[in-house]
Amino acid sequence: QVQLVESGGGLVQAGGSLRLSCAASGRTFSTLIMGWFRQAPGKEREFVAAITWSGASTYYQDSVKGRFTTSRDNAKNTVYLQMNSLKPEDTAVYFCAATQSAPTMRLRIDAAYDYWGQGTQVTVSS
């Protein structure tokens, strides 16, 4: 089992920045592929970013490329999502997720992940 706890959400003005953290416990963190998803009111949950176990590879949704960066610190069992130049359309509940193994082509699909955090609210005002 893996427990994931997100933190760092909040209210920010458009153009501002936030850094989300996701702390993992229960299984060797360095063996996990980590993902970030978000869900806005009335919308489906969508992929935001993913990072492989070593951090060597990262993947992003097109709408956040160049603005968001995911990274991880395996010594601290934590993955991060640095969000810059935030827009009102980034408003959503953000979730981190983990899987031990998934093909690269499936990392953008929420069904590929076995463990989920409870989510943290990010609100961007215009």
Image: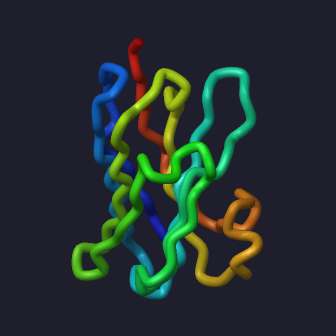
The answer to whether 43 appears left or right of 24 in the picture is right
From the viewer's perspective, is residue 77 above or below residue 41? below
Q: Quadrant of residue 44?
A: top right
Instruction: Residue at 44%, 84% (x, y): give it.
Output: 56
The answer to whether 49 appears left or right of 113 in the picture is left
Instruction: Residue at 61%, 28% (x, y): give it.
Output: 40
Confirm whether residue 52 shows in the render.
yes
Confirm whether residue 28 shows in the render.
no
Q: Where is residue 9 in the image (x, y as percent from the top left)?
A: 34, 36
From the viewer's perspective, is residue 104 above or below residue 119? below
From the viewer's perspective, is residue 51 above or below residue 97? below
The answer to whether 60 appears left or right of 108 in the picture is left
Q: Position of residue 64 (x, y in %)?
A: 52, 46
Instruction: Residue at 67%, 45% (x, y): give it.
Output: 46
Q: Where is residue 39 in the image (x, y as percent from the top left)?
A: 62, 35
In the rendered image, the residue lying farthest to the top is: 126
**Which of these two is toward me, 44 or 69?**
69
Q: Position of residue 122 (x, y in %)?
A: 42, 30
Quadrant location of the C terminus?
top left
Count the labels in the image.
Answer: 0
Q: Quadrant of residue 120?
A: top left
Instruction: Residue at 29%, 39% (x, y): give it.
Output: 18
In the rendered image, the residue lying farthest to the front is: 66
